[in-house]
Image (cartoon, rainbow, N blue to C red):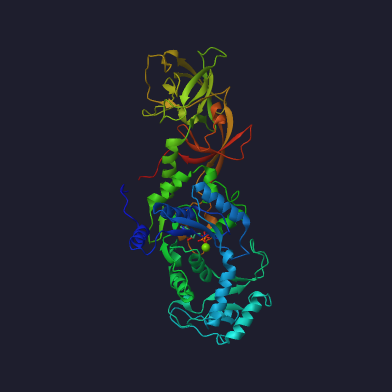
């Protein structure tokens, strides 16, 4: 990946617009529909909209696209704000498409008066049938030539609640044979007798996306309206409304949406996972939602680094989730505190030459990048626990951890030697009787080295920790490419959550860094809100090992 980044196509457009004086400063917007929680794809859009504005001294509005009252809710409105703040972005104004319902309505009457809109009584099926296809022109509605007066009356009656849902719609009168299907008399308003989370029962007609988005941009004087590629076919219509209404000329630009391997980014599907109880909630740490990855331990810095690295493109692409994990590791490696935690199924180590009851405290840096910085205190006693993976009875030559008659350093402390193995009746190793070498105290001045260093905890001081080990949510890398006749839920990874009990050094309980910590030699873990004062629950953020090659 190049170090010096070339300007991306959006930056080029903005720079040209500023240079030519077409705009004085830039104003972007982030337009979420409050029908679900934000996901990693939205983070990409946020980084672009807010990032570009920041870079060029402009501003960004947060505008909720709240024209679908039945699917929207204030729960989502609030969660979206929390997620944006967490990413560290500040919006200029908090706005709602519903703020403009009155203005949009007036413009609709204006279009009717100019003969550019009509009330259509056709059913949905009739409208669909009469729309034609890309190859064949559509058919005019039998209601297309109503008089302005009749249209105005009917439209007012629609607003006043005289008709049932679906009985009538307001359509623009453009061209039923237009080569761009979007122009075949698009629907402007539909009737929906539904309670809106902001406007209550004031309206029973709601404007359609295409009739709303551009005008909202225009009302706010948005200079660059950035959205995902699937909207490029809508752009001519976006321009048509702005031009026809003679309002501020906002412009729309499209970029490729973010897709990631082993996950999905459709709010509809994520909602289904939540509703069916297939995950623990929107903030389940396996979810690609921002609240999910936050709970898992991903940081805003890592997400921004990732968005920066993937750049913007005009072509849809599937990004390797390994790159995102790489960014998380990069960030946490620099900032996270270190602790020793022996995970599930440890082996007991008894030091036969340690004075009974003696405790020795060692200082260990919280972060090795700052060896002179803050320290934690680690208690060392005659009975310890080590990871089962750090001992091997018939070890190959290149195995540098503990083996019978072999030596290893216990991190920050002494070198120990394994003298005797104790097994249970099934032949499972349950205890290693070892001796420590007092001369190998790190401050003894008589440093001698061994090839292996392993982590450990003192049994007497160990704290039990519930470790939630997460893996990918789906087993398939390209979830967008699964066969049409298969359900995405068939690909849920049954191993995506495994719970283990870990034994932690006591200092972990006092960690108040607020970000994920590193379990030395294992990976990064973030404290979960399910933790109690008695028992820590830690979510595995990402392993230490890096399989991604940058
Ligand atoms: P979904 O398909 O998940 O429901 P959406 O596009 O309907 O997403 P919105 O709330 O309308 O969700 O999205 C707000 C903004 O975020 C839009 O400008 C949209 O283009 C952008 N966005 C949504 N998904 C992605 C993605 N995967 N990558 C980049 N931008 C995205
Ligand atoms: Mg949308």
Location of residue 191 (image quadrant): bottom right
Location of residue 405 (image quadrant): top left
Locate residue 22, reporting x and y percent.
37, 65
Locate residue 223, reporting x and y percent.
43, 63
Circle count: 0
Vertical comparison of 221 with 366: above or below: below
Location of residue 440 (image quadrant): top left
Work out whether residue 351 or residue 542 is closer to the camera in this orientation and state it: 542
Left or right: residue 72 compared with residue 414: right
Vertical comparison of 361 with 115: above or below: above
Locate residue 367, reporting x and y percent.
44, 30
For image coordinates 38% across by 61% down, the residue present is: 315
For image coordinates 44% across by 77% down, the residue present is: 180
- Answer whether residue 155 is visible to the viewer in this image: yes
Left or right: residue 401 compared with residue 291: left
Vertical comparison of 201 with 433: above or below: below
Locate residue 528, reporting x and y percent.
58, 40
Q: Quadrant of the C terminus?
A: top left
Vertical comparison of 181 with 473: above or below: below
- Answer whether residue 286 is visible to the viewer in this image: no
């Amino acid at each position: 990946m190049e170090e010096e980044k070339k300007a991306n196509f959006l930056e080029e457009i903005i720079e040209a617009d500023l240079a030519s004086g077409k705009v004085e400063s830039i104003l972007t917007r982030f337009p979420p529909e409050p029908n679900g929680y934000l996901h990693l794809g939205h983070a990409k859009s946020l980084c672009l909209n807010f990032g570009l504005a920041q870079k060029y001294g402009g501003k960004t509005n947060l505008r909720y696209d709240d024209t679908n009252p039945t699917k929207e809710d204030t729960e989502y409105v609030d969660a979206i704000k929390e997620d944006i703040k967490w990413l560290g972005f500040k919006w200029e104004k908090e706005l709602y498409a519903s703020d403009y319902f009155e203005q949009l309505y007036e413009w609709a009457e204006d279009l009717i008066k100019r003969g550019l809109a009509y009330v259509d009584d056709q059913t949905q099926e009739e409208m669909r049938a009469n729309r034609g296809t890309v190859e064949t022109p559509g058919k005019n509605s039998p209601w297309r030539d109503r008089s302005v007066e009749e249209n105005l009356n009917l439209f007012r009656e629609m607003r006043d609640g005289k008709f049932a849902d679906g009985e009538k719609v307001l359509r623009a009168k453009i061209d039923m044979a237009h080569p761009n299907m979007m122009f075949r008399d698009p629907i402007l308003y539909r009737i929906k007798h539904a309670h809106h989370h902001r406007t209550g029962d004031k309206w029973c007609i709601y404007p359609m996306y295409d009739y709303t988005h551009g005008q909202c941009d225009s009302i706010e004087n948005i200079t660059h309206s950035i959205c995902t590629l699937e909207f490029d076919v809508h752009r001519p219509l976006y321009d048509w409304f702005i031009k026809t209404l003679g309002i501020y000329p906002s412009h729309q630009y499209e970029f490729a949406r973010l897709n990631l391997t082993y996950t999905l980014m459709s709010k509809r599907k994520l909602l289904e996972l939540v509703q069916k109880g297939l995950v623990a909630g929107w903030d389940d740490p396996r979810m690609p939602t921002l609240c999910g990855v936050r709970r898992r331990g991903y940081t805003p810095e890592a997400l921004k680094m990732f968005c920066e690295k993937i750049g913007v493109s005009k072509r849809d692409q599937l990004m390797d989730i390994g790159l995102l994990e790489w960014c998380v590791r990069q960030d946490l490696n620099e900032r996270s505190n270190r602790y020793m935690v022996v995970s599930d199924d440890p082996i007991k180590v008894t030091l036969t030459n340690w004075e009974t009851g003696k405790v020795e405290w060692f200082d260990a840096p919280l972060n090795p990048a700052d060896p002179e910085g803050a320290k934690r205190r680690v208690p060392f006693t005659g009975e310890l626990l080590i990871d089962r993976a750090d001992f091997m009875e018939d070890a190959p030559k290149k195995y540098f951890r503990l083996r019978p008659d072999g030596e290893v350093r216990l991190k920050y402390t002494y070198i120990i030697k394994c003298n005797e193995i104790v097994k249970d009746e099934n032949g499972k190793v349950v205890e290693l009787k070892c001796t420590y070498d007092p001369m190998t105290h790190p401050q003894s001045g008589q440093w001698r080295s061994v090839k292996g260093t392993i982590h450990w905890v003192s049994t007497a001081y160990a704290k039990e920790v519930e470790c939630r080990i997460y893996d990918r949510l789906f087993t398939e890398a390209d979830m967008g490419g699964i066969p049409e006749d298969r359900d995405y839920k068939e690909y849920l990874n049954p191993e995506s959550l495994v719970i283990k009990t870990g034994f932690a050094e006591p200092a972990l309980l006092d960690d108040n860094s607020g970000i994920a910590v590193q379990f030395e030699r294992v990976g990064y873990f973030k404290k979960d809100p399910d933790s109690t004062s008695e028992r820590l629950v830690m979510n595995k953020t990402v392993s230490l090992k890096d399989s991604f090659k940058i």
